[in-house]
């Protein structure tokens, strides 16, 4: 077998110029700075007004309030059995000051489990309020009577909510509304006789009941604050009331939180590979971006000061039907004066846009800091990917009013700290170890404070899954 190597074929295979692969060895490449996919818009950090906290602690002084805020109780599930976590019973206003753990455990053991189906009536309006109900799972609607006798949904309750605790202090109080299940779920019930039997044996519980009733009888404003006595519309020599403004004796204090890391760079890298880009500078830049992303996450999700966990029970509402609708956002906006921003996961914003399209409603926009963003009723709807989406494909939408002068939500930081690199963030040289590795301590200090309860509200259980 022979191979034909004619002169014509050899001429076609011969390279006539320098190849691009070889030429690249003599060329200078143009490089980008290191890129990072995890950088988000961080609208929460951008929109909060930041307050200087020189002493590291921010105290929120308020008028004295007799109305104790509600919270969410927690549950533990073992197979089909659901039990309330005893310490979380302090979220019931009457039990807020109870410190006896054994007493809370005895109270928790007296709750009985009951499963319900969608559409089932749990209690009927007008019947005696003879039990406390804890919603362990599912959603129920409180149905009252309108002005003209029609049925109307006056509220919705979901996981962790409770109702009927007025029965613990006022026997034979009638239910003001009917409670009907919107979904299937589980409720834990505490009958009045079971509570009364425990109260008869516990001095602490009896004293707490008396104190709670005494506070409820004090003169209060519609917001539960100690009343300021005034007179108006009088004539002649009317004797004017005397008054004073009382303050909380133990106001809440917010301490600055911290996010930290130790950045390590080998001295050989810093010495030999610093052109055309400074290695330490770019290592530090991306590390700071990661710290700021964690700061944004904490501002939303931290249990002590995060926006999601600091909204009062009375400022939390449920969706009417699952997906976020214009009706839901209208209800959320109506709960406070001067709502300035709405924060939502991008998927929740998309779900709201779909609901608007289904109804033929135009979903408008607004200009914010040079960006064209969606808005509802003139309030910017800002994307925040740090708001979680649960495994059940539900999320939340947060409404806030901001600023100290506006009695809203403020961010907290301290400037002028040693080795400050950015406001509230410093970079401190920690030395070079025996392996020639340079270390820098990078720290960001921050927190957030809610000045009065209605500064923040949350629309919960927002379904973001596509409709079938």
Image (tube, rainbow, N blue to C red):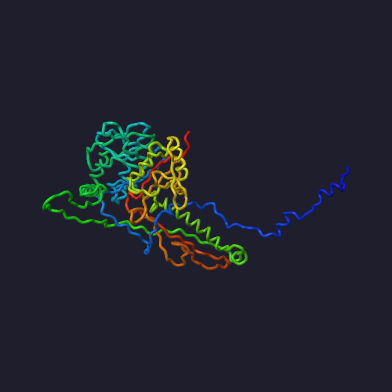
Residue at the outermost left position: 237
x and y percent of residue 211 in the render?
A: 22, 50
Vertical placement of residue 275 versus 461, above or below: below
Vertical placement of residue 410 versus 168, above or below: below
x and y percent of residue 46 in the render?
A: 44, 54
Residue at the outermost right position: 2
Along the viewing direction, whichever of 401 and 74 lies nearer the viewer: 401
Q: Is residue 103 visible?
A: yes
Q: How many marks?
A: 0
| Residue depicted at 33% across the width and 33% down the height | 180
| Residue depicted at 48% across the width and 54% down the height | 293
| Residue depicted at 25% across the width and 56% down the height | 247
x and y percent of residue 122 in the render?
A: 32, 34
Quadrant housing residue 392? top left
x and y percent of residue 297 in the render?
A: 45, 52
Left or right placement of residue 147 versus residue 116 in this view: left
Q: Is residue 87 visible?
A: no
Left or right placement of residue 38 versus residue 339 in this view: right
Vertical placement of residue 403 versus 466, above or below: below
Viewport quadrant of the N terminus: top right
Along the viewing direction, whichever of 327 and 126 lies nearer the viewer: 327
């Amino acid at each position: 077998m022979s191979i034909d190597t004619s002169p014509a074929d050899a001429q076609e295979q011969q390279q006539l110029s320098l190849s691009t692969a070889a030429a690249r060895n003599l060329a200078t490449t143009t490089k980008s700075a290191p890129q990072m996919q995890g950088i988000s818009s961080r609208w929460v950090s951008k929109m909060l007004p930041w307050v200087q906290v020189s002493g590291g602690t921010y105290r929120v002084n308020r008028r004295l309030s007799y109305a104790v805020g509600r919270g969410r109780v927690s549950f533990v599930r073992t197979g089909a059995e659901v039990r309330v976590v005893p310490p979380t019973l302090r979220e019931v206003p009457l039990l807020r000051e109870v410190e006896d753990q054994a007493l809370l455990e005895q109270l928790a053991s007296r709750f009985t489990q009951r499963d319900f189906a969608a559409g089932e009536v749990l209690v009927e309006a007008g019947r005696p309020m003879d039990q406390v109900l804890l919603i362990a799972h599912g959603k129920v609607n409180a149905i009252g009577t309108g002005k003209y006798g029609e049925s109307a949904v006056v509220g919705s309750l979901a996981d962790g909510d409770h109702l009927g605790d007025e029965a613990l202090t006022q026997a034979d109080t009638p239910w003001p509304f009917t409670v009907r299940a919107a979904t299937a779920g589980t409720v834990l019930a505490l009958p009045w006789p079971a509570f009364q039997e425990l109260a008869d044996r516990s001095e602490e519980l009896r004293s707490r009941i008396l104190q709670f009733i005494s506070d409820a009888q004090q003169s209060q404003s519609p917001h539960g604050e100690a009343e300021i006595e005034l007179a108006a519309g009088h004539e002649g020599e009317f004797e004017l009331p005397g008054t004073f403004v009382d303050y909380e004796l133990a106001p809440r204090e917010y301490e600055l939180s911290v996010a930290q890391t130790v950045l390590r760079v080998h001295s050989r890298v810093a010495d030999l590979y610093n052109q055309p880009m400074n290695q330490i500078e770019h290592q530090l830049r991306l590390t700071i971006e990661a710290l700021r992303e964690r700061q944004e996450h904490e501002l939303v999700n931290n249990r002590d000061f995060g926006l999601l966990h600091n909204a009062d029970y009375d400022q939390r509402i449920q969706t009417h039907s699952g997906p976020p609708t214009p009706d839901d956002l209208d209800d959320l906006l109506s709960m406070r004066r001067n709502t300035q921003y709405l924060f939502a996961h991008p998927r929740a914003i998309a779900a709201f846009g779909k609901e608007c399209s289904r109804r033929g409603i135009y979903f408008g926009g607004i200009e914010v800091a040079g960006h064209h963003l969606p808005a509802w009723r003139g309030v910017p709807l800002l994307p925040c990917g740090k708001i979680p989406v649960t495994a059940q494909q539900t999320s939340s939408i947060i409404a806030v009013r901001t600023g100290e002068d506006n009695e809203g939500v403020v961010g907290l930081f301290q400037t002028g700290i040693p080795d400050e690199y950015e406001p509230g963030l410093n970079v401190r040289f920690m030395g070079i170890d025996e392996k020639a590795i340079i270390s820098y301590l990078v720290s960001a200090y921050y927190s957030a404070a809610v000045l009065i309860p209605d500064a923040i509200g949350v629309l919960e259980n927002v379904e973001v899954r596509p409709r079938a």
